[in-house]
Amino acid sequence: MVREDTGSGLVLAVSGAQNVARRSRSFSQLGLVAHPARVNGGVGFVSYLEGDLFTVAALTVRNNRITALDFILDPKRLADLDFTILD
């Protein structure tokens, strides 16, 4: 499951392994620079586009598998998120 909050008022949700893989490939085409991060106390990553914060992603892990990805792309919400980039 992938959920994306772009700030439009709607959250895009994609489920199913093939659909999630397709959606993930679309992000890989953007040239983002990603860093592992602790997001709101959990596991995630932070991505930058041309040096600017683009998205923060929180991962849900169950039985050693990623079961959900929650992407925040809304600039207003990004400013309020608690994250720490890990080295």
Image: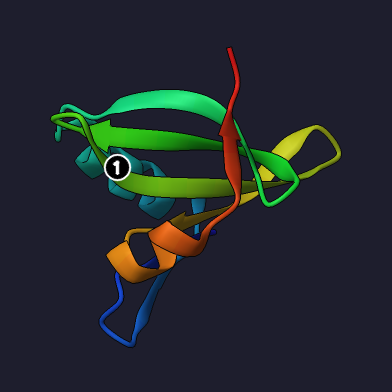
- What residue is at 45 percent from the left and 47 percent from the top? 56
At a point 75% along the width and 46% down the height, the residue shown is 41
Residue toward you, 7 or 25: 7
* In this picture, residue 87 sits left or right of residue 54: right
Residue that lies at the very extreme toward the top in this rendered image: 87
- In x, y percent, where is residue 53? 29, 42
Q: Residue at x 60, y 34 (%)?
A: 84
- The answer to whether 7 is drawn above or below residue 66 in the figure is below
Front in this rendered view, residue 5 or 54: 54
Please state the total of marks drawn on the protein image: 1
**For mark 1, what is the residue?**
53
Image coordinates for residue 47, horizontal then vertical, percent:
35, 35
- Can you see residue 15? no
**Residue 48 can be seen, yes or no:** yes
Say which amino acid is labelled 1: Leu
In the rendered image, the vertical position of residue 73 relative to residue 13, given as above or below: above
Q: Which residue occupies 15% across, 32% down?
A: 29
Q: Which quadrant of the rendered structure holds the N terminus?
A: bottom right
Q: Quadrant of the C terminus?
A: top right
Who is closer to the viewer here, 78 or 7? 78
Element under label 1? strand
Q: In this orientation, which residue lies closer to the viewer: 84 or 3? A: 84
**Could you tell me residue 74's position as x and y percent?**
32, 66
